[in-house]
Amino acid sequence: MFARLSTYQGSPVPPEGDLTVQSEAVVRQVQDVPGFRGVYYLVDRATGQAKSLTLWEDEGTMLASEEQATRIREETARREGQRIVSVERFEVGFSHLQPGHLQPGHLPPEA
């Protein structure tokens, strides 16, 4: 499995701000791309920094998705008032999610 980590910088997000407003639209754009396996969106509300982590079946499918991913990333950043700081690519060494705690396509329960 491979991962693409994109870093964005925007304005701070208020505590009451809804981070899931655009999530369905973004997921719809990427879910049918061959090799796509999942996505995480990480946010530091205080600084406005955000990261998206997309997971790919293998390096070939990740690289084949570059053009489409660039378009989605640029459109999303523009819509959200963010600037793209960096895009990095990694091989996933390992992963583990506790069964039943996080379902694909769903956000974890609030702590």
Image (tube, rainbow, N blue to C red):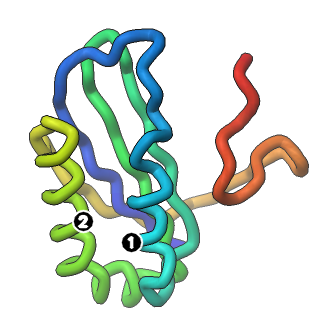
Q: Residue furthest right?
A: 100
Determine the residue positioned at 41% across, 72% down: 30
Q: Nearer the viewer, residue 1 or 44?
A: 44
Tag 1 secondary structure:
helix
Residue, disc 1: 29
Residue, disc 2: 72
Where residue 26 appears, as percent x and y from the top left, is 39, 60
Q: Indicate the quadrant where residue 33 lies.
A: bottom left
Q: In screen coordinates, is 51 left or right of 34?
A: left
Q: Which mark is residue 57?
A: none
The vertical placement of 89 against 10, above or below, is below
Which amino acid is tagged 1?
Answer: Gln
Determine the residue positioned at 17% across, 58% down: 75
The vertical placement of 12 against 52, above or below, is above
Q: CA distance from mark 1 to mark 2?
A: 7 Å
Which amino acid is tagged 2?
Answer: Ile
Q: Tags 1 and 2 in contact by the CB under 8 Å rule?
A: yes
Q: In screen coordinates, is 103 left or right of 21?
A: right
The vertical placement of 93 against 8, above or below, is below
Q: Indicate the quadrant where residue 109 lies.
A: top right
Tag 2 secondary structure:
helix
Where residue 8 appears, as percent x and y from the top left, is 21, 39
Q: Nearer the viewer, residue 53 or 20?
A: 20
Determine the residue positioned at 48% across, 83% down: 32
Determine the residue positioned at 56% across, 64% down: 38
Q: Indicate the quadrant where residue 47 lies.
A: top left
Where residue 104 appears, as percent x and y from the top left, is 70, 59
The vertical placement of 68 against 26, above or below, is below
Q: Which label's residue is closer to the chain start, 1 or 2?
A: 1
Disc 1: CA contacts within 10 A as few (<14), some (14-19) or many (>=20): few
Disc 2: CA contacts within 10 A as few (<14), some (14-19) or many (>=20): some
Q: Quadrant of the N terminus?
A: bottom right
